[in-house]
Amino acid sequence: MNQKEFINLVIVNQLGDIVKLHPYLSFGLIATGIEFLGACIDNHHVQKSFESGDRFRNAIFKLFPEKYHQFAKKNSTYDLYTELRCGMNHCFLPKSKIDLSERKSSHIHLSLVNNSLVLLAEDLFSDLQNAALAVIEMMKNGMIPEKFQLDVGEN
């Protein structure tokens, strides 16, 4: 499976199933997916160490709508890398400035409630999905190279 196929299968399609069935679990996978897309668009090997923060923020700034940019600044109060990605990937909980929710709640995505940034699983995934499709297009148009090939099944 080439990199474009992997992105389409795993991020665009399979992760959508997880968002529907297990919204809480999806936040950690979405955060990892953001970092992965950042690895796809930088000039380093996809598994280069010590690039997590830069890759995550770069993906937000280059692939996500502008409404996210204020939340991707290093050392900002609501820094998505620190508060979401590191929280979810290191201890399975977001840090204190992030509230995780779903569309069925009364909350609005990227709003501030009680001094916390609200993230809705479905909205965050939709923006990740669009970012993933943009990366696929960048590869198709020769703007960025494919960095890996996987010998895995499609299930």
Image (cartoon, rainbow, N blue to C red):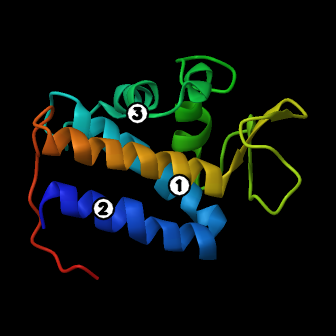
The correct choice, above or below, for 90 with respect to 40 in the image is below
Mark 1 vs 3, N-terminal side: 1
Mark 2 vs 1, N-terminal side: 2
Q: Nearer the viewer, residue 117 or 51?
A: 117
Other-residue count near label 1 (Cα within 10 Å), few / some / many at <14 / 14–19 / ≥20: many
Other-residue count near label 2 (Cα within 10 Å), few / some / many at <14 / 14–19 / ≥20: some
Amino acid found under the numbered disc labelled 1: Gly
Amino acid found under the numbered disc labelled 2: Asn
Labelled disc at residue 63: 3
Mark 3 vs 2, N-terminal side: 2
Q: Position of residue 51 (x, y in %)?
A: 30, 30
Amino acid found under the numbered disc labelled 3: Leu
* Residue at image coords 63%, 17%: 76
* Residue at image coords 74%, 34%: 97
* Mark 1 secondary-structure assignment: helix
Q: Position of residue 119 (x, y in %)?
A: 70, 45
* Residue at image coords 34%, 31%: 55
The answer to whether the residues at label 3 and label 2 have Cβ atoms under 8 Å apart is no
Q: Position of residue 135 (x, y in %)?
A: 28, 42
Asked whether the viewer can see residue 32, the reply is no
Name the residue carrying label 2.
8
Name the residue carrying label 1.
28
The answer for how far apart the CA atoms under marks 2 and 1 are is 18 Å
The answer to whether the residues at label 1 and label 3 have Cβ atoms under 8 Å apart is no
